[in-house]
Structures are given as C-alpha cells and as structure tokens.
Amino acid sequence: MLRKLFVSTLVFVFLFSALASANAIPAEGMTSQDKLSAAETFVYGTVQTGSLMERINKIQKDMYGKTTNDPLMQKIDKMYAYAKITSLEAPAFSFQLNALEWSFNHTISSDRPAKIRLEDVEHTVSGNVVQGALDDRLHSLLKLSYSAGRVEAIGTSIPKDSLVKIKMTQALSNKTNRVGDKVVFQVNEDVYAGGVLVIAKGAVGTGKISKVEQARNFGRDAELKIDFESVEGFDGTMVPVFLGDKAKKETLSMAKAAGASVAGMIVLGPIGIVGGAFVHGKDITVPPGAEMYVQTTNDIDIYGIQSK
C-alpha cells in the first residue's frame, strides 16, 4: 500500500525539461575501435583487452563459433552490424535477443550483457547453461517461441507525444546529486504503435541532473531539475523523450487513481507514484521505484515485433 505524505505545507516544484538528441553515436560516425567496443560491451558487459585482431577473433568465436577470413576492418564492421543493426531482411542479434527474452518474461533486460541474458533464458527453459556459439544457442531457443525460429522485424513509426510509463532505478536527492549526474530509469509498460511492440518493458532510459538548489532560509524551496533524454527502442534506436503537458496530465491521473494525496501537481510516495515532490522548505527525495510518464519528442521510425 502507498503510504500517504503529510501535505499540510506540501509544495511541488519538481522541474523537468526536454532534450531531443539521441543518446548514441550514429554507426556512420563510429570508428572501428568504437564499433568493436560497442559490440563487446553488448556481449560481455565490458570492453575486452588485447589487440584489435585478438579481440575480434574472440568475439567472432563466441558469437559464430569460428573466425572469418575477412580483412580486420571488415570483420569489425560485420560484427557490429550483426550484433546491433536491424533491417527487415536481417534482424540484429540484439533485436532477436530482446524478442526471445520478452516472449518468456514480457520484459527485457537490455542493460545486462547479452551472454548473461541468454544464459538466464537457457536456465529458465532447461535448468542448464548450454555450451557453443551464442548464435546457435539463440536460434535454438527462438524455435520454442517463434515459427521456424525466426523473428520478423516490422517497420513502423512511433508518433510524436506517445506516452511512455517509466520508473526510477536510483535514489535522487538535492542533498546527494550534482549537476551533470546521470539519471537512469526503466520503461515500466510496453509501448505499441499500430499493434507493433516498439518499446519493451524493462528498456533503459537516461537523463541527467541539470539543476540543483538547496533549501534556504525564509521557506525558499529546494529544486532538483532533470533533463530526460531518451529511452531504448526495441531495435536499439534511442527514442528522445521529455516531460510535456500530456505526460504531466497522465501522471497526475495515475496519482489520483492510486488514492495518493494530491496538492498542486504530483505526489511522491516511498514506494513511488512519482518522483518529484518535497515538503515546503525541506529537501527533495526521489526513491527508486518512483513512477511517472514521459512522452516522445517527435515521430521516429523504428523496427518492432508483432505481438498483438
């Protein structure tokens, strides 16, 4: 149950603003080193050590079960595209892993290494972790959920101002946070566009702290301002989001429906309806699990899966 706040002097001044830029370097702007590091971080969670040749051979063996005879730069380009770039003809490994994980759990954990995510599904299915190339293991599991073990990528568009329900994954406070601090949150409900799943529950979103003011004398309130930046779409596209009027209205409706005490705009509960309330003259505290809505900044093309 949500514990109500004492609101006799409750004042809400939680400030948000939009940042419409994506949180990723376009593939055409990446060096070979960038691409290999991105592929390694996706698979292992960290950038690996050694020469470029040693590193690309390792990830090729782990992913394909063998190395190829392509020139070094071509090996890296192919690995990055295989891991991260989705098209109608060739859904990326990351896209297919999202589809696999979602089919079993109706949530994804794209913030974790692909190797660990795949092992977790294997353990769920058989109680064991399978050996062999990650690609073979992925497609073996996909046969349990999708026809012929193939995931179909469907191109669509997320309309501007589409609502995205999120929850905070870290504690935020004007006492502990500083300007520039990264803010991480998760999508808390699937988002569909025309029946196509385009943003999955569990997808990661990011923002940053852009303003911190401490409470001062004579009842001057503390402030904590967050710039929401983007959430990760099903195909890895970084979807720009912000807290606009539509999101504020939906957040307020959610707070009221939960029976929370409402004064001004938004209510904050210890288990979290919304992040962003503080008692007059006191400090702002946003607990992990606090929920709210943001909305998409503009129309954006994306690949998703048919799930309805």
Image (tube, grey):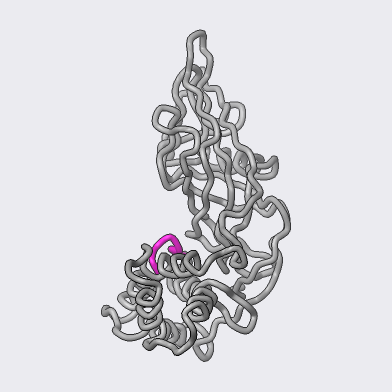
Q: Residue at x 40, y 77 (%)?
A: 56
Estimate the x, y position of residue 302 in percent, counting from the top left: 65, 67
Quarter in which the N terminus is drawn = top left
Q: Is residue 249 left or right of residue 9?
A: right
Estimate the x, y position of residue 248 in percent, counting from the top left: 64, 40
Range shown magenta: 108-114
Estimate the x, y position of residue 161 in percent, counting from the top left: 70, 51
Identify whether 238 is placed above or below 217: below
Q: Is residue 130 left or right of residue 77?
A: left
**Residue toward you, 40 or 239:** 40
Q: Residue at x 51, y 45 (%)?
A: 291
- Per the picture, the main secondary structure of the magenta-coloured stretch is loop
Q: Residue at x 34, y 72 (%)?
A: 120
Please say whether residue 8 is visible from this viewpoint: no
Estimate the x, y position of residue 246 in percent, counting from the top left: 69, 44
Q: Residue at x 47, y 48 (%)?
A: 184
Please say whether residue 87 is visible from this viewpoint: yes
Identify whether 11 is placed above or below 170: above
Q: Is residue 132 left or right of residue 280?
A: left
